C-alpha cells in the first residue's frame, strides 16, 4: 500500500509549521523534502520505497545546500568574528566621546550584528564627527578621528 500524494503534502506542511514551534531551522528541510515527494507522487506512481528514498535524498540535499551555499553569507555578520574585519570601518558619532568616557557610534551597515556601538577614544571627539574603528576592546569599539 502506497501512501497517497497528499499525505506527503500535509506532512510537509506540518513539518514546516513545526519549525515555528521548535525554532531550530532544521526541520524545515525535511518538510520541503516531503513537499517534493508529494509533488513527484502526484505526477508519477512511485512505490513506497522510492518515496522514502526520494524524501531522504531531497531532505539531505537541502540540508547540504544550506550549509555549503546559503549559510556562508550569514557568517560574515556573526557575533564573535575576528576584530580584523571591523578595524578601519568608518562610522558617525551620535554622542560625544572623551578620554575615560564612553560615547556611541553608528554605522551604515551592521558590524558584528549591531549598527550602533558604545565606543571609547583617546582624544575628545564631538557628536557628528566621522570616526574610524581602531580596535575592538571587549564589548566596546576604540575609535579615532577618520
Image (tube, rainbow, N blue to C red):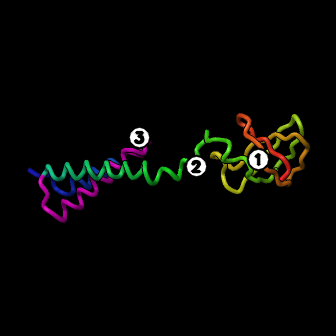
What residue occupies the far front of the structure in this picture? 84
Residue visible at 18% across and 65% down? 43
Q: Is 23 within the magenta?
A: yes
- Residue 54 within the segment the image draws in magenta: no
* Residue drawn at x 41%, y 42% as measured from the top left: 21
Residue 63 appears left or right of 102: left
Q: Which mark is residue 76?
A: 2
At x 54%, y 47%, the residue is 75
Residue drawn at x 60%, y 48% is 77
Answer with mark 1 or mark 2, whichever residue precedes in sequence.
2
Whole-angstrom CA distance, mark 1 to mark 2, is 17 Å
Distance from the alpha carbon under mark 3 to that under mark 2: 25 Å
- Residue 12 in view (yes/no): yes
Tag 3 near tag 2, CB within 8 Å: no
**Distance CA(mark 3)–CA(mark 1):** 38 Å
Residue 20 on image: x %, y %: 42, 46
Is residue 14 visible to us here?
Answer: no
Lower sequence index among marks 3 and 1: 3
> What SS does tag 1 mark?
strand
Comparing labels 3 and 2, the label whose residue is closer to the camera: 2
Q: Residues within 10 Å of mark 3 (few under 14, many from 20)?
A: few
Residue segment shown in magenta: 18-47
Which is more foreground, mark 3 or mark 1? 1
Residue position for label 1: 133
Check disc 3 and report the residue beneath it. Answer: 22
Q: Earlier in the sequence, mark 3 or mark 2?
A: 3
Q: Residues within 10 Å of mark 1 (few under 14, many from 20)?
A: many
In x, y percent, where is residue 15?
A: 33, 47
Amino acid at each position: 500500500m502506497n501512501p497517497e500524494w497528499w499525505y506527503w503534502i500535509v506532512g510537509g506542511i506540518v513539518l514546516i509549521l513545526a519549525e515555528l514551534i521548535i525554532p531550530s531551522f532544521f526541520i524545515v528541510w525535511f518538510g520541503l523534502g516531503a513537499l517534493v515527494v508529494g509533488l513527484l507522487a502526484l505526477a508519477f506512481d512511485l512505490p513506497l520505497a522510492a518515496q522514502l528514498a526520494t524524501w531522504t535524498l531531497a531532505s539531505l540535499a537541502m540540508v547540504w545546500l544550506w550549509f555549503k551555499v546559503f549559510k556562508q553569507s550569514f557568517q560574515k555578520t556573526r557575533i564573535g568574528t575576528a576584530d580584523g574585519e571591523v578595524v578601519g570601518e568608518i562610522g558617525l558619532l551620535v554622542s560625544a566621546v572623551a578620554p575615560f568616557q564612553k560615547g556611541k557610534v553608528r554605522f551604515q551597515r551592521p558590524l558584528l550584528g549591531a549598527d550602533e556601538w558604545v565606543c571609547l577614544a583617546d582624544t575628545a571627539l564631538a557628536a557628528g564627527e566621522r570616526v574610524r574603528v581602531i580596535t575592538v576592546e571587549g564589548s566596546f569599539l576604540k575609535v579615532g578621528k577618520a
